Image (spheres, grey):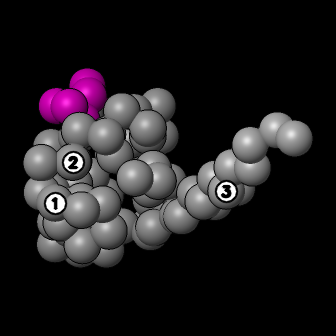
Amino acid sequence: TPEERPAPEPSQTYTIVSGDTLGKIAQKLCGGFANWTKIYDANASVIEAEAQKYGKGSSDHGHWIYPGCTITIPSA
């Protein structure tokens, strides 16, 4: 019989609020501040599009994030 594997955890979404940083979100939902890059990498297109909507050339690799933007939190 094939080895049974647990189903992957569904991705969680999070809507950015004022005062958030990717590091704070990672600390709260992703096992530690240093995991902010995983969040950025999983959401780069959304984060960059939002930055452009607000007149920025880029988000500066996730430095500029905006309230109301919904991102996906990658599973551990």
Under mark 3, the amino acid is Pro
Q: Position of residue 49 (x, y in %)?
A: 44, 35
Neighbours of disc 1 within 10 Å: few (<14), some (14-19), many (20+): few
Q: Are marks 2 and 1 in contact (CB under 8 Å)?
A: yes
**Badge 3 is on which residue?**
6
Q: Earlier in the sequence, mark 3 or mark 1?
A: 3
Alpha carbon of mark 3 to alpha carbon of mark 1: how far?
Answer: 24 Å
Q: Is residue 19 above or below residue 41?
A: below
Mark 3 vs mark 2: give the one in front. Answer: 3
Give the number of the disc on residue 65. Answer: none
Question: In the rendered structure, which segment of residues is drawn in magenta?
Answer: 57-61
SS state under label 3: loop
Q: Nearer the viewer, mark 3 or mark 1?
A: 3
Choose between 27 and 62: the one closer to the eye: 27
Distance from Cα at disc 3 to Cα at disc 2: 23 Å
Crowding near the residue tagged with mark 3, few <14, some 14–19, many ≥20 C-alpha atoms within 10 Å: few
| Amino acid type at image mark 2 | Asn
Residue at 32% over, 68% down: 29
Q: Nearer the viewer, residue 74 or 15?
A: 74
> At x 21% / y 48%, what residue is drawn?
35
Q: Which residue is mark 2?
A: 35
Query: Compared to 68, does 7 lie above or below?
Result: above
Q: Main secondary structure of the magenta part?
A: loop
Give the percent coordinates (x, y) of residue 62. Answer: 22, 40
